[in-house]
Image (cartoon, rainbow, N blue to C red):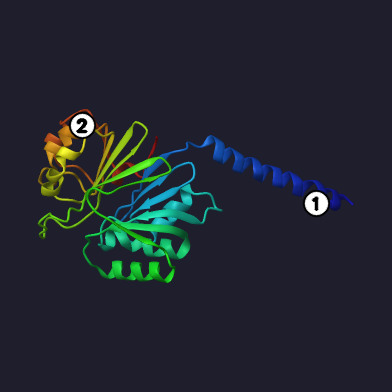
Amino acid sequence: MKNRRIIKWGIPIAILIFAFLIYFYFLHRDNYGIYFFNLDRGRSVFIYSKSSTILINGGQNSQILRELTKILPFYRKNIDTIILTRSDSKNVGGLIDIVKRYRVGEIIEPEIMGTSTALTIFEKTVLDNKIPIEKVKKGDKFEIDNIYFSILFPDPNFKYNKTSMPEMVLNISYSTTSILLLGDVSKTIQKSFISEINKVDIIEYAHGAGDSRTSFDLFDKVDPEFVIISKQINSTPFKRRNNAEIINLKEKGTRKFSF
């Protein structure tokens, strides 16, 4: 009899607690935000909104799966949009596991892109899962749940070489927040779109942003409040450029911003 009472009241109480946790999660978390993941190898950025999830690159290996499980509820098994900015394994390798593990709505990648073994495997996995791919280039714009994306690069008219490889550069905005994802593009590429960008709140470099890899003309124009880098900075002029907070992911770990 006692066990029956426990079952009778225990199950409804457990359901109510579970429902409350879901309610609390959806109503009390911030509605828009961005994570810059600290990965051992490679680069990945995750954006969420009220109803969408967007993953930009996936690092080199399955570490991205562990990072996503830390921030997504256990029942969330879909990624609405994957944006791939570059073909090398440091960006695309982890996406192979993502496509196998999650239901992915669409892939967005540059119209102009290099080749790699990892990219070949990724695109075959995408094809096998019948995920649509959209190709974009400089000047293209799209919107996801009131988050606006502007493609500053790759440029079909740009003369590429070994130091200036094709890669997607994104200017992302929501409400009054603006983010510039530069990735690993060269100084020459950075200078190519100075006239097309204004002040941003956050700028991200997929390296240490040293003198040899940073266009200070671009940096001065965008005048960011936060600078995301992937390793120790070695540029004294850069550190004294403005009052921006420099966030080294290798030292401080994954960083989240709410919009």
Give the residue pinned by disc 2. 223
Disc 1, SS: helix
The kind of residue on which mark 1 rests is Ile
The kind of residue on which mark 2 rests is Asp
| Residue 96 visible in the shown view | yes
Residue 7 has which mark?
A: 1
Q: Quadrant of the C terminus?
A: top left
| Residue 239 visible in the shown view | no
On screen, 194 above or below 61? Answer: above
Q: Residues within 10 Å of mark 2 (few under 14, many from 20)?
A: many
Q: How far across and down, in percent of the image, does residue 234 sit?
A: 15, 42
Residue at the spot 27% in from the left edge and 49% down from the top edge: 140
Residue at the spot 44% in from the left edge and 65% down from the top edge: 100
Q: How far across and down, in percent of the image, does residue 231 sit?
A: 24, 47
Q: How far across and down, in percent of the image, does residue 3 sit?
A: 84, 52
Q: CA distance from mark 1 to mark 2?
A: 61 Å
As rendered, which of 3 and 134 lies closer to the eye? 134
On screen, 56 above or below 123? Answer: above
Which quadrant holds residue 36? top left
Residue at the spot 15% in from the left edge and 38% down from the top edge: 195
User: Which of pointers 1 and 2 indicates the residue nearer the eye?
Assistant: 2
On screen, 250 above or below 77? Answer: above
Left-right relation of 43 to 47 = left
Residue at the spot 45% in from the left edge and 42% down from the top edge: 49
Disc 2, SS: loop
Say if mark 1 contacts mark 2, CB within 8 Å: no
Q: How far across and down, in percent of the image, does residue 83 sit?
A: 34, 54
- Mark 1 or mark 2, earlier in chain: 1
Residue 214 has which mark?
A: none
Which quadrant holds residue 203? top left
